[in-house]
C-alpha cells in the first residue's frame, strides 16, 4: 500500500496515462482548472461522475483513486482472440448444435482510453445444445468470450473460452460472473456486501487482491451473466495467445 493522498493518486494516474490535463479535462467533461484542483488537492469533494470519468480516462480503478482500495489499474480478463477461428460459420450445424455469439471489448474513438462491450456480429462459435440443457441455460441467453490474463488461473486458464448465461444475473455469493466494469470485460468471483456493495475476487489472489465496489460505485458495474462453462487451455509459460 502506497498510502497516498487522493490528489497524489490522481496525479499518479494522469501521469501514468500519458495524457495532459487538457485531454483529461475533455474526457471528463470539466475545465482544465478543475483537473488542476484535483491534482493540487484544492477541492475537498469530487463528484462520483467525475471520479468514474477520470478512471475511464486514465485506466485506473475508481476505487483506488477514491479510497486507495484494490489494485491501481483494472485489467481486462476477457477478450476476443483469433484462436476462436476454428469455430467457423460455414460448416452446417449438427442436430445438437447452436450458434453462440461472441462478446469483445472495443476501444472508443477520440483517444479517450475508454472502451465498451459489443457483440461480434460476423463471428460465432458452435455450442452443444446438450451442454446448455445440462447447465440450465436457454440457447438465446448463451454468449461466449475468451479469457486473457492470469487472474483466474488454477480454475480458468489464460486463453480459455468461456460460456456466459445472460439470463442469470442475480448474484449467488462466490459464483463466477462475467461483468462489464466501465466498459471492460472481466470475469470474477462475486460476493454481495452489507449495504449493497460488491466484492470482486480473483482466483490468483497472490497477484490480484480483492476489489471492493461500494454502493456509490455500482453504476460502473453491470453483471453480464453467470459463467456456466469454460474450456481447459494450458500453455507453456511465456507463450503468447
Image: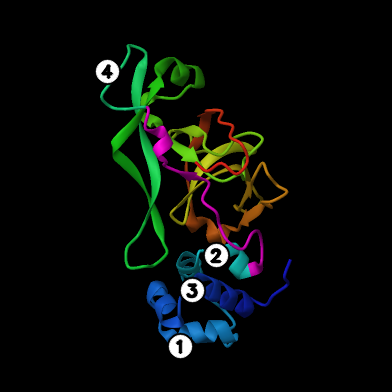
Residue 52 shown in magenta? no
Q: Position of residue 157 (x, y in %)?
A: 59, 36
Q: Position of residue 161 (x, y in %)?
A: 48, 33
Q: CA distance from mark 3 to mark 1?
A: 18 Å
Residue where numbered disc 1 is placed: 33
In the image, is 85 to the left or to the right of 3?
A: left
Q: Which residues are magenta?
A: 67-86
- In contact (CB < 8 Å): disc 1 and disc 2: no
Earlier in the chain: of badge 2 and badge 4, it is 2
- In contact (CB < 8 Å): disc 4 and disc 3: no
The structure's colour scheme is rainbow
Look at 32% across and 63% down and name the residue there: 109
Q: Main secondary structure of the magenta part?
A: loop
- Note whether 157 is above or below 198 in the view shown: above
Q: CA distance from mark 4 to mark 3?
A: 48 Å
Disc 3 crowd rating (10 Å Cα; few below 14, some 14-19, many 20+) is few
Foreground mark, 3 or 2, reads: 3
Residue where numbered disc 2 is placed: 60
Foreground mark, 2 or 4, reads: 4
- In contact (CB < 8 Å): disc 2 and disc 4: no
Earlier in the chain: of badge 1 and badge 2, it is 1
- Marking on residue 167: none
Residue where numbered disc 3 is placed: 18
Earlier in the chain: of badge 3 and badge 1, it is 3
Q: Secondary structure at mark 4?
A: loop
- Marking on residue 92: 4
Earlier in the chain: of badge 3 and badge 2, it is 3
Amino acid at each position: 500500500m502506497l498510502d497516498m493522498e487522493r490528489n497524489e493518486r490522481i496525479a499518479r494516474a494522469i501521469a501514468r496515462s500519458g495524457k495532459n490535463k487538457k485531454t483529461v479535462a475533455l474526457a471528463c467533461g470539466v475545465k482544465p482548472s478543475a483537473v488542476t484542483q484535483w491534482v493540487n488537492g484544492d477541492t475537498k469533494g469530487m463528484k462520483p461522475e467525475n471520479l468514474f470519468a477520470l478512471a475511464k480516462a486514465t485506466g485506473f480503478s475508481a476505487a483506488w483513486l477514491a479510497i486507495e482500495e484494490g489494485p491501481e489499474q483494472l485489467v481486462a480478463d476477457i477478450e476476443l482472440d483469433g484462436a476462436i477461428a476454428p469455430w467457423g460459420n460455414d460448416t452446417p450445424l449438427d442436430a445438437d448444435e447452436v450458434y453462440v455469439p461472441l462478446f469483445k471489448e472495443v476501444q472508443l474513438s477520440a483517444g479517450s482510453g475508454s472502451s465498451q462491450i459489443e457483440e461480434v456480429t460476423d463471428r460465432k462459435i458452435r455450442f452443444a445444445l446438450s451442454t446448455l440443457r445440462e447447465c440450465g441455460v436457454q440457447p438465446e441467453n448463451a454468449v461466449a468470450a475468451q479469457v486473457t490474463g492470469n487472474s483466474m488461473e488454477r480454475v480458468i486458464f489464460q486463453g480459455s473460452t468461456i460460456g456466459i448465461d445472460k439470463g442469470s444475473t442475480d448474484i449467488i455469493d462466490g459464483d463466477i460472473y462475467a461483468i462489464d466494469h466501465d466498459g471492460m470485460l472481466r470475469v470474477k468471483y462475486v460476493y454481495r456486501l452489507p449495504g449493497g456493495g460488491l466484492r470482486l475476487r480473483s482466483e490468483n489472489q497472490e497477484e490480484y487482491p480483492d476489489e471492493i465496489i461500494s454502493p456509490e460505485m455500482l453504476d460502473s458495474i453491470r453483471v453480464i451473466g453467470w459463467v456456466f462453462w469454460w474450456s481447459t487451455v494450458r500453455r507453456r509459460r511465456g507463450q503468447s495467445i
